[in-house]
């Protein structure tokens, strides 16, 4: 191949790749032809807030595993102190729980007078278990003189029920102005709900709803034993329970439910 032919072939090759070379002219064209958002800063999408940390329908569920304990902590110390808990959350939680073991031991006589038995179970939960039960929550509230009202889908319990029932009976007979005073009295009672996911929620300003809850929930007197043993009831008494919850007392064939069947149904409804 002659020298002239080689030059001609080289020029043709260079011309064929001209548009793909990073020449000053091509770089200018690239910059001018970019879409306006080419240099748009990258926006980091915010993570969706954990639903357990949000207030939904005036309910607050602590975004921590032991929701019941942290509700107690908030009732004792307030939201501000709760929000200041740092990254050493687990260590701090254990420190607080262990401190209450000492308080339980120091106040055993007082607690037993309030019908709290088997306190060793509460001590074990505080030091060894990841979550506390309602019994331990109730003991902690008793130590700190915190009044609460517990509610699930079917029942209501309060450690101040006698007082609440009196006010509930009087409320329809008194005027609006006095109703405010009734609510002021409820302000010391904190309303705790058990959710369908077996977490616990603190109702914000729940005291304003206590009157309604009393009218729509079945009252129990003991969180540990919401219903007595089967031997304490007659069949007719169990049927009255069923009537209260608007449940049939006969099976699909029209045959009356047996006493054990009635009792089991009611037990499951009242179980907390």
Image (cartoon, rainbow, N blue to C red):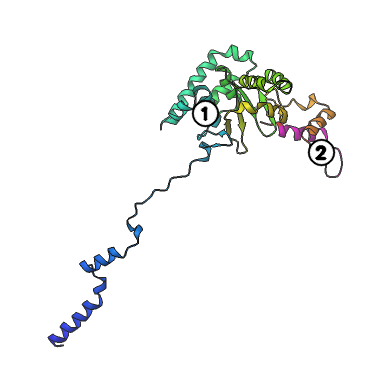
Q: Using the image as rendered, state which of residue 76 and residue 93 is in the foreground.
A: 76
Q: Using the image as rendered, state which of residue 154 and residue 224 is in the foreground.
A: 154
- Left or right: 244 as drawn, with respect to 176: right
Q: Which mark is residue 158?
A: none
Identify which residue is drawn at 54% across, 15% down.
105
Q: Which mark is residue 70?
A: 1
Q: Is residue 8 visible?
A: yes
Q: Position of residue 164 (x, y in %)?
A: 68, 20
Residue 32 occupies which quadrant of the picture? Answer: bottom left
Q: Position of residue 229 (x, y in %)?
A: 75, 26
Residue 176 occupies which quadrant of the picture? Answer: top right
Cα distance, mark 1 to mark 2? 40 Å
Judged from the image, the secondary structure of the residue bearing numbered disc 1 is helix
How many other residues sit within 10 Å of disc 1, few (<14), some (14-19) or many (≥20)? many
| Mark before the other along the chain sequence, 1 or 2 | 1
- Left or right: 260 as drawn, with respect to 226: right
- Left or right: 164 as drawn, with respect to 187: right
Mark 2 = which residue? Answer: 248
Identify which residue is drawn at 62% across, 25% down.
207
Judged from the image, the secondary structure of the residue bearing numbered disc 2 is loop
Q: Is residue 115 magenta?
A: no
Q: Which residues are magenta?
A: 248-269
Q: Is residue 223 visible?
A: no
């Amino acid at each position: 191949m002659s020298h002239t032919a080689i030059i001609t072939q080289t020029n043709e090759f260079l011309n064929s790749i001209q548009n793909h070379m990073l020449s000053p002219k091509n770089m200018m064209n690239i910059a001018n032809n970019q879409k306006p958002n080419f240099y748009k800063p990258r926006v980091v999408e915010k993570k969706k807030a954990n639903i357990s940390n949000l207030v939904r329908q005036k309910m607050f569920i602590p975004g921590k595993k032991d929701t019941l304990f942290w509700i107690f902590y908030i009732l004792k110390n307030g939201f501000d102190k709760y929000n200041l808990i740092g990254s050493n959350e687990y260590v701090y939680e254990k420190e607080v729980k262990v401190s209450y073991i000492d308080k339980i031991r120091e106040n055993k006589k007082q607690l037993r007078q309030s019908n709290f038995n088997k306190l060793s179970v509460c001590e074990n939960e505080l030091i060894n278990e990841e979550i506390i039960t309602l019994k331990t929550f109730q003991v902690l509230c008793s130590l700190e003189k915190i009044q609460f009202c517990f509610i699930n889908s079917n029942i209501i319990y309060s450690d101040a029920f006698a007082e609440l029932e009196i006010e509930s009976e009087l409320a329809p007979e008194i005027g609006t102005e006095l109703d405010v005073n009734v609510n002021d009295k409820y302000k010391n009672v904190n309303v705790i709900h058990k959710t369908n996911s077996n977490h616990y929620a603190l109702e914000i300003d729940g005291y304003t709803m206590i009157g309604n809850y009393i009218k729509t929930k079945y009252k129990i007197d003991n969180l540990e034993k919401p219903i007595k043993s089967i031997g304490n009831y007659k069949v007719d008494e169990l049927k009255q329970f069923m009537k209260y919850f608007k449940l049939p007392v006969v099976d699909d064939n029209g045959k009356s439910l047996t006493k054990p069947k009635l009792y089991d149904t009611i037990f499951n409804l009242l179980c907390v």
